[in-house]
Image (cartoon, rainbow, N blue to C red):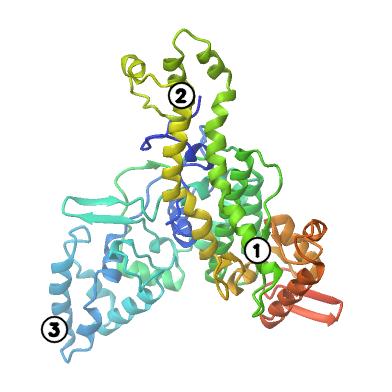
Amino acid sequence: MTQKIDGVDFAVDEHIWGHRLYDEQLPHLTILEFLCVLGSNIDSPLQEDADGRVQYKPQRQYRLRSLLFNNPFVEAIRAKSLSDADKWTMWNEYFSAEATGFEASDMSYLRSSFANFDDFSKVITLLRSSAFEVHSNKRWSSKFVFPFGPDALYEDLRFTSKGVSNDRRFFARTGELLYLMLCRAKGGADLGKVLVERLFDRETPMNRLVRVLQGEPQLADTFRDGGYLPLAEHPRFDRLCSDWTAILSRDMPVYDALEHLITNAGLNLLLYFLERGKEVAGDSEPIEIICEVVSYERTKVRALSGESYQANQALSFRAIRANIESVRLKEEWLKALASDDPHVECARVMSAHFQWPSTTIDDDELDAMQKTGDELVQELTEIAELRHKQHFGKIHATWSRAIGLSSRRLSRRTRYAPNDRLLKTLVVSVVEDRMQFDEFLRELRTRYGLVVGDSEGAHLVKDKLVDQEALSENRANLEARLVGLGLVRRLSDSCSFVENPFISKGEAV
């Protein structure tokens, strides 16, 4: 018997990966949702209750988000040749006309918080410029300021004529799953304390600016349960926790560290998605991501990287078919087949494991269906694959592109070709101070399944999928790329070191 998940017609993807990973919730949105959960559990960060659940009451910050993203006239008013008092009066009239009614009945506190209207307008412009996807065509209530501190955090909302509600399109619970993963990781509680210390300082200058605009926090009315994560433990949870702990130990400003946390979370979540697909499909081989370091010449590594990408893209579809087919091996299925009414009893087994047919269907309706167990399995497989294509099936393509792991540059096919941003995050995550280049490549293979050079790809050479020279050249291209980024120092032709410019605090330089 599996856990019942509310709000779904049938549960297949959810029992493999959780409820829910979502392709449109990109890594930065995942982190923002994660921080909303963390901010509501600041006294016991990254800790579940006795039943393995997490509850939270997210901030909504109506005033802040409306001032930043539903306030297009503030700059135009600042440019007018009016007295300061007239600017405030004109702005208040315009803002009140566009307001949702949830901000506040009286916004006069802003006038007493700023020396003049021009200063107020400049703060709006400054904070707005820091926002994620500031120039996107998303509705204003789904735009987010950079998380400068606890007052800058709020959930995705939808405003309609009927009122306001939380929206599950961009805050689709992936951040809740990330929170649960770190709760269940070894060292999660210690990481929680560090995250609160580094990211929830209310007295930082930028957070104080945010607080001036927002005033007192505005919260959701009730607590809500976090998402559903089917696994109590997984090596990827521990890897994610170790990576984040390492990043936060580096000697860099927390806002810079946050950018690396976002990229690292995207990579580890993507690997969790692929690894779970392999596990459920019955494939015991580790994930392999063959990376081309982009060069202007077409290479055999490029073709192999594209094939690696396509193989991983198909993993999740294999997983859902295997998950549904596995019901045939269960003892209760065999008993159902041997019963006096196998049609009804097989339907009961399917309903118990997949919430399909509906758990509310009665005996007469089950009997009227008159579908064999094989027909039920086939039908669920078909509708599960159709639903999977809509969102879960797009996760690999969408997230790998978002974190800079995949590209179509200089090629008609998408393949793995890490960009500079991802490479910097890998160095910050893996290298404490300095690390021999070949050791760095081995760590990338061990931790993340990334294959770049001839040593890590020796099995590919053995299987005659690529020649050693091509992989050696790919390795040399990565070394040259990291030299250009200031992340590798060559001591000789055969000895290079990867250097982390942000060594861990307390280490000798």
Q: In terms of depth relative to the viewer, which is nearer, 399 or 87?
A: 399
Above or below: residue 428 compared with residue 277:
below
Place of residue 46 in the rendered image (x, y in percent of width and height, measured from the top left): 54, 47
- Of labels 2 and 3, earlier in sequence is 3
Q: Amino acid at mark 3?
A: Asp
Q: Would you identify the image quadrant in which residue 101 lies? A: bottom left
Write down the residue under mark 1. 305
Q: Which residue is mark 3?
A: 86
Q: Find disc 2 in the rendering and name its residue.
A: 352
Q: Is residue 92 above or below residue 35?
A: below
For this rendering, which residue is in front, 22 or 49?
22
- Image position, residue 224 (x, y; %): 37, 42
Q: What residue is at 59 percent from the left and 43 percent from the top?
A: 184
Label 2 and label 3: CA atoms lie apart by 67 Å
Disc 2, SS? helix
Viewer-side residue, 269 vs 70: 269
Q: Specify the farthest residue to the top.
A: 340
Find the distance from the CA under tag 1 to the CA under tag 3.
62 Å
Nearer the camera: disc 2 or disc 3: 2
